[in-house]
Amino acid sequence: MSCESRIPCIDFSKNTEDLVEGSEGWNDLCKQVGEACAKFGFFQLVYDQAPVKLHEELLVGMKELFSLSDKTKEKNVHSKPHRKTGYLAKIEAVPLFESLGIINAHILDEAREFTDLMWPNDNPTLCQTIHSVAKMLQELEGVVRKMIFENLGVEDYYDSNMKNSDNIFRVLKYKAPRNDESNIGLPPHTDKSILAILYQYTNGLEFLSKEGQWLETQPGTFIVLAGEALMAWSNGRIHAPTHRVVINGEKDRHSYAIFATPNEGATVEIPKELIDKDHPLQFRSFDYMEFLRYLYANPHLDNHLKIYAGVEAV
Ligand SMILES: O=C(O)CCC(=O)C(=O)O
Ligand SMILES: [Fe+2]
C-alpha cells in the first residue's frame, strides 16, 4: 500500500521483529512515530497483519447496523459525559453524519452487550467481528502510544497511562449529499482523545498541515491521529491536528475508528520530565471528564482546552 507523499507513512509490516521492543527495528519505528506525531500529529500506518476479510466483514455488518430503525439505534445510550459512546445522528450542523460508539469493545462481553441491544435475537457474527477489530486496534493503539512515550523519554508513565484510559470503538456513516447539500461530512475539528486509529473505506478524511494546506488521505490504510488529551499531557510536544471529512462522489461513506481516552477519574498531568526552560508548563492538571463536561456546556467556544486548563506564560 502506497501513501500520499506529503503525509508520513510508517510501515509496521516490514519485519515482524520490528514490533519486538528493544530491537533495532523497534527503535527506528519509535523515532519515526514520535517525529510524525510531533510534526504532523498524524500518519498513515501500514499494517498488513490486519486481515482484509475483517474490514470487509465489518463493512457488511456496519451497513446492517445503520439500516436498523432509529428507535433501535437510539437504545445505544451514551455513558456520560462521553457523547461519542452513544448514537449520534440528525445533528443540524452535520446532517450527513451518523455514528454508533461502544466503550471497550475489545472486551467480548461489552461487544455482546451492544449487539444484544441492537438485535435481541442475537447477531453473533457481527459481535465477533466488532470484538476482533476493536481488540486489534486497541493493541495497535497501545503499541503506538508506547512508541510515542519511548521517544519522549517518559516510558515509565506508560503503564499507569494505559491503566487510566478506556477506548471507544465507533462505526461512522456519512450519507452522500444531495445536490443542494454541502459535501462537508464533519467540519474542521481536533479530537479530544489521546490517540485514534481510523480506517476509511473511501477517501474523504483531510488534515490541515501546519502550513495551512488541506492534505488528503487515502483509503485502505490505518490512520493514526493524536488528540488534545495527548497534546496537553505531552506539554504541547505532540500536535493535535485539525481535520475534516469531505464526501466525494455519490456513494455513502463508511469508516471506523478506535479512540483512546482518559477514563472516569483520570487526571491529565504533564510529567515533570517534559517541563523545562525551553518547554514551560502549558496546561495545569485537569480532570478529563470535567473537561468534557465543560466542553459540552460551552459549545459556542473555540479552543476549549486552552481556556479551561491553559497556563498563561509568565
Ligand atoms: O470518519 C472519519 O474519517 C473521521 C471521523 C472523525 O474525525 C471523528 O469522529 O472525530
Ligand atoms: Fe476527528
Image (tube, rainbow, N blue to C red):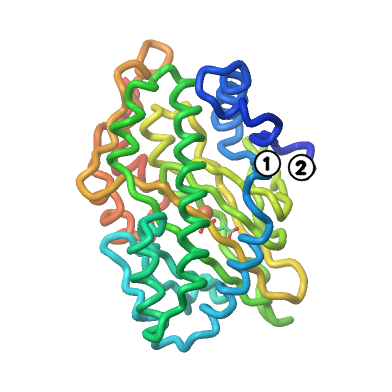
Q: CA distance from mark 1 to mark 2?
A: 9 Å
Q: Name the residue rendered at 55%, 24% in the picture.
A: 30
Q: Residue at x 62, y 74 (%)?
A: 60
SS state under label 1: strand
| Residue 105 percent across, percent down from the top left | 40, 59
Q: First in sequence, mark 1 or 2: give its number.
A: 2
Residue wearing tag 2: 3
Q: Is mark 2 within 8 Å of ligand 1?
A: no
Residue positioned 63% across, 21% down in the render: 25
SS state under label 2: loop
Q: Is residue 45 above or below residue 295?
A: above
Q: Position of residue 272 (x, y in %)?
A: 30, 18
**Mark drawn on residue 157:** none
Q: Assess disc 1: are there few (<14), some (14-19) or many (≥20) residues with their C-alpha within 10 Å of its C-alpha.
A: many
Amino acid type assigned to the residue bearing label 2 in the image: Cys
Q: Using the image as rendered, state which of residue 266 and residue 126 is in the foreground.
A: 126
Query: As drawn, is 3 to the left or to the right of 65?
Result: right
Vertical placement of residue 155 versus 99, above or below: above
Quadrant of the drawing holding the C terminus:
top left
Percent of width and height locating residue 283: 32, 32
- Check if mark 1's residue and mark 2's residue have beta carbons within 8 Å: yes
Left or right of 223? Residue 217 is right
Residue type at mark 1: give it.
Answer: Val
Residue drawn at 64 percent across, 58 percent down: 200
The one nearer the camera, 284 or 33, is 33
The residue that disc 1 covers is 46
Label 2 crowd (10 A; few <14 / some 14-19 / many >=20): some
